[in-house]
Image: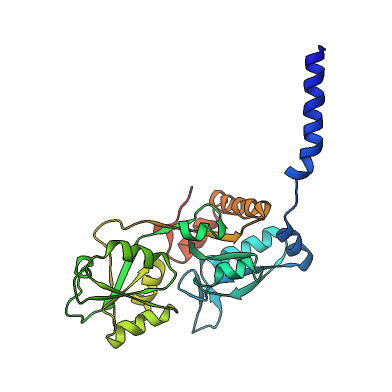
Amino acid sequence: MSLRTKASTVFISFFVLIAGPVLAQPSPILSAIQERGDINVCIWPDYFSITYMSPRTQHLEGIDIDLSHELANDLGVRVNYIKTHFGRFMDDLESKACDVAMFGVGNTEARRQHVNFTQSYLASNMYAVTTKQHPLISSWSDMDQAGVIVCVQKGTYMENAMRKSLKHATITTVQRPNEREGEVLSGRADVFITDYPYGQKMVNLYDWAKLIAPPGKTEQFEYAYAVAKGDNAWLKRVDQFVSDIKQDGRLAQAAAHYNLTPIMISE
């Protein structure tokens, strides 16, 4: 062996010796989960077919209820749900109130400044909801005219998208999601903007609601699981879970059960 080869071998061995502990650094969040024996999952319990508290059964149901149990099973722990909403979940992650947000969180540039996202597993267009008897709104193009009031939930990707796309309509915001339909029913707003899952809730549960689909694809918004910044090992573990459920069929099974196959990302 030449001196150069020996020197290279010594250098590589030294690098592995000092870098190994860094590369293999355990996840503080995962360690805490395993020590507690449960994983704290942030959910919004009014997200139809995603994380929904059924008024009939008083039980949580939806694709991310099923999949959060799958994640807990993979980790060998129990699941504990922490109620949150889109305007607060990032604070809940940063304060360690929950370990992961699993409720169809839109992966937006603004949110990426504060939290990390796994690969996406769902993607949806935007949809509009109005009343069946509305005198002005019968198509997507009817929204963007002077005098029309469009309601969006504050802090959602729909708010930013509508502010960019609407030139003539007036945009109003509400804090809680179920306030949107209240605004439309009261006449304070003409229409509200939502996504595929919530739109399905409206037409399935309310006979007054009319769902308006865009004529083509709107800005596509992808949904992923979110974790706090600063623990890349935990991000990698949750992302691996998403890869696993795509490959082994668990995602497809859950999506089919809740009629979400049209918006599932399988690869």
Residue 231 place in picture, x, y as percent: 67, 55
| Residue 6 in which image quadrant | top right
Quadrant in the picture for the N terminus: top right
The residue at the point 37 percent across, 64 percent down is: 160
Which one is in front, 228 or 81? 228
The residue at the point 71 percent across, 60 percent down is: 29
Against 4, residue 78 (above or below) is below
Which one is in front, 205 or 211? 211
The residue at the point 63 percent across, 50 percent down is: 236
| Residue 32 in which image quadrant | bottom right
Q: Is residue 263 left or right of residue 61?
A: left
Which one is in front, 80 or 158? 158
In the rendered image, the residue lying farthest to the bottom is 186
Q: How many marks?
A: 0
Q: Is residue 65 left or right of residue 106?
A: right
The residue at the point 79 percent across, 64 percent down is: 35
In the rendered image, the residue lying farthest to the top is 2
Q: Is residue 258 left or right of residue 95?
A: left
Against 204, residue 15 (above or below) is above
Residue 55 place in picture, x, y as percent: 49, 84
Which one is in front, 114 or 79? 114
Q: Is residue 238 visible?
A: yes
